[in-house]
Amino acid sequence: MSWWETLRSGLAAIRAHRLRSSLTVLGIVIGISSVVLTVGLGQGAQREVEEQIDALGSNLLIVSPGSSTDSSGMRGGFGSASTLTYADATALADAEAVPDVAAVAPTTSGSVALVNGDTNWTTSIVGTTTDWPDVRRRDLAAGRFFTIEEASAGAPVVVLGEDTASELFGRQSPVGRTLTADATRLTVIGVLSSSGASSTGTSEDDQAVVPVGTASRLTGNTSDNVATIYVEAASESTLTAAYQEVQALLANRHGVTTAEADFSIATQDSLVETANETNRTFTVLLGGVAGISLLVGGIGVMNIMLVSVTERIREIGLRKALGAAPRVIRRQFLVEASLLGLTGGIVGILVGVVGAQVLPHLIDQTVAISALATVAALATSLALGIGFGVYPASRAARLTPIDALRSE
């Protein structure tokens, strides 16, 4: 029997038991589509993180306060203390002290309720300096950022995030309009371009950016402390040097050694690694579930082929009596098992591709289909058909003509 005749015979055997074959294929479809979507989710999350990091800049240092300890001896995490000051940021902006630093943007943060007539919206408020848009690589969709004079005077001006502007003004342009924040009237001078979520998961489009002095009045924080200091290195190649200079200067100002530093410095590389590690864990967990689905699908293929061998014992006996070699019988059942696996793989990939288009609208997460993962999934489905079809095919090939003919 030629390969073409074997293929036609296999298709005929599958069509003869459509329901049973369809249920067997379904197990492989679930497993393959799960693999495609799992890898797609992992790669989509990684791509989003990389885009966020690229948007922030590969030469950015993020300086955070150290940990705090309460009266009971309980220690908070990094960032819970108030160890960084506006004076620290000013010192870091000194080109002679830290020559590899290009710009510095200290920030304070809090929450404020903004009111526009009958509309109100509570958002996070960011107090900072004029270097903030350059250091954070944020563009303006409309208007302008505040000037050095406005920053020095703590002028009542505000730049809104895109979502904040939309919540307060709808489709109207907010530039030039006024808002009320805790009895303080603020003039909207600009709207930031959309940036999405930050590497920490918070929205970068729902915030109000004001001068440091203005933020102090709105939040009631009259101290010189800042929540974060963003430091931009002169270039990516000088990032390490800038890191060491910032670390040494702050340790000297705070009267501590670098080993006892009451602050922490993070680079974009560390944020990327942390995010990717989380994504890898997530992908492995989902991949394990998908692997179990594939295993179940493979067992289904073996089961259906064993049933097929049992049902077709007389056919096998007749073919062997007519001179069919064991390898021909083995090939027949392997082809049928391979067709089941391959069909499940193709349909599973199609389901995964469709799911990749629909899923982002349901969970707000990018799904990036990987060509390599798709090819690997197809190869896996074919391997499942062959691998789990070997035993039933070998069992059929071992039957002797006389045993097969008298079994009925």
Image: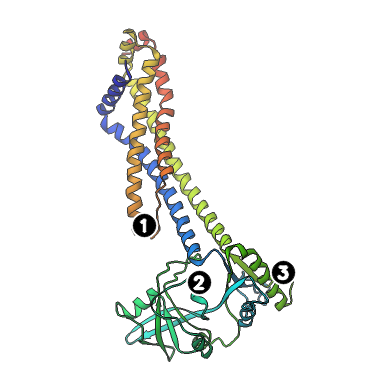
| Marks 2 and 3, how far apart at CA | 26 Å
Q: In front: 301, or 217? A: 217
From the top left corner, tell me how far across and down residue 218 is, in percent.
49, 87
Camera-side mark, 2 or 3: 2
For residue 28, which quarter of the picture? top left
Task: Pick the quarter of the image with the C terminus.
Answer: top left
Q: In front: 147, or 251? A: 147
Location of mark 1 (residue): 360
| Marks 1 and 3, how far apart at CA | 44 Å
Q: Secondary structure at mark 3?
A: helix
Camera-side mark, 1 or 3: 3
Q: Residues within 10 Å of mark 2 (few under 14, many from 20)?
A: some
Task: Pick the quarter of the image with the N terminus.
Answer: top left
Query: Could you tell me the amino acid type at mark 2?
Result: Arg
Q: Residues within 10 Å of mark 3 (few under 14, many from 20)?
A: some
Query: Could you tell me the amino acid type at mark 3?
Result: Thr
Does 160 sit above or below residue 276?
A: below
Q: Is 239 displayed left or right of 404 in the figure?
A: right
Q: Residue at x 30, y 11 (%)?
A: 318
Location of mark 3 (residue): 258
For residue 31, which quarter of the picture? top left
Q: Residue at x 55, y 86 (%)?
A: 221
| Marks 2 and 1, how far apart at CA | 27 Å
For residue 71, which quarter of the picture? bottom right
Does 109 sit above or below residue 242?
A: below
Counting residues from the start of the chain, the first of labels 1 and 3 encountered is: 3
Location of mark 2 (residue): 136
Query: Could you tell me the amino acid type at mark 1?
Result: Pro
